[in-house]
Image: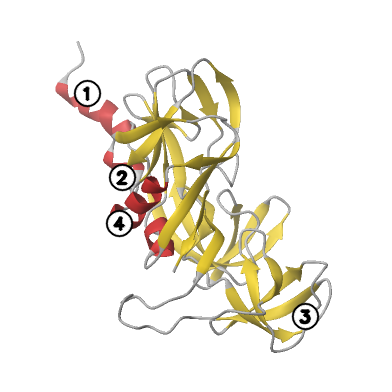
Amino acid sequence: MASDTDLILNRLATIPDVGHKLGIFVRMDGALAVVNVGDRSVAIPCSGYYPPVVGMAVQLERRLGALIVTGPSAQLNPIGKIKAGGAPKCTVTVDGIDYVLGLRSSYTPVVGDDVEINWTTGIIQGKITATPVAPDTGQNPGGGGGPFSDLVVMAEGSGSYNGGWWTNDVYNGDNNVGAWFYGTRVADALRGTQPTSMEIFLNPRQASGNAPMIGWHGSSTFLGGAVSVAFEVPVEPRSGWVALPVDFAIRLRDFGGGIGVTPSGYTIWRGTQSDGLSGALRFAGTR
């Protein structure tokens, strides 16, 4: 029989060695991201946001002693101003920082244009021709910003729990509870908004049996142990952008947490380490 000491050591061995740092993305070097951290540069895998935009502040996570890029350190403003033209890329200023981004073929940049940016792809979508903002009459204390769509928030991490977190992939069979985690990203992105739709990106590597059950959980990270998934609904299809109840978006906005799947059928989804879009959430709504 194992001693109390052995049981404690075995339990400690299941706790992931995780830490966080911030850096500035410089460039891709083959499959590795070159990131400035303090006064030195490091070349590390990029799993959560691929590839980042040059100059973007990114979050680094230490897992079992190794650093990886997991995504931007904060949700970036989707509105910028053209600073210098060019093709196929031009310079756009966003909140005082200059970025060199690609263009849609239908848009010719003009210095001074206010433009919309898709930070997931790093592409300037085009000139904003009409952005009316309704005056604040006091009926909406948060002010007005109009409708938005295609607001994408990447997952910070993912995993499966069966006595401990043992894999980055997301399982919903064999007594596993799988989950995606977002830290404060969703709450930050949706603050002051009223979501009207929500989708999650799923990439299965194996699927069979009944439709999986997917729901909301209240944990921002897997460091606290097993998650409790609630308000579950069946999810079909199991791949691509899949609609979820807008109530999940409201809970994520107001209470944080993430998305989880519980044992039902048998599906294995690729985790954030093998698919940077795994668990990404896409929202539409009004500000």
**Which residue appears at 30% of the width and 35% of the height?**
230
- The residue under label 1 is 7
**For this view, does 272 lie left or right of residue 142?**
right
Mark 4, secondary structure of its residue: helix
- The residue under label 3 is 109
Q: Earlier in the sequence, mark 4 or mark 3?
A: 3
Q: Alpha carbon of mark 3 to alpha carbon of mark 1: how far?
A: 63 Å
Quadrant for the N terminus in the image:
top left
- The residue under label 4 is 254
Mark 3, secondary structure of its residue: loop
Q: Earlier in the sequence, mark 3 or mark 2?
A: 3
Image coordinates of residue 147 in percent, x first then y, are 51, 67
Instruction: Residue type at mark 2: give it.
Output: Ser
The reply to whether dot 4 and dot 3 touch (C-beta < 8 Å) is no
Q: Residues within 10 Å of mark 3 (few under 14, many from 20)?
A: many
Image coordinates of residue 127 in percent, x first then y, are 70, 77
Dot label at residue 153 = none
Q: Is residue 134 above or below residue 9?
A: below
Q: Alpha carbon of mark 2 to alpha carbon of mark 1: how far?
A: 26 Å
**Which residue appears at 34% of the width and 83% of the height?**
137
Instruction: Residue type at mark 4: give it.
Output: Asp
Q: Alpha carbon of mark 1 to alpha carbon of mark 4: how far?
A: 38 Å
**Front position among marks 3 and 1:** 3
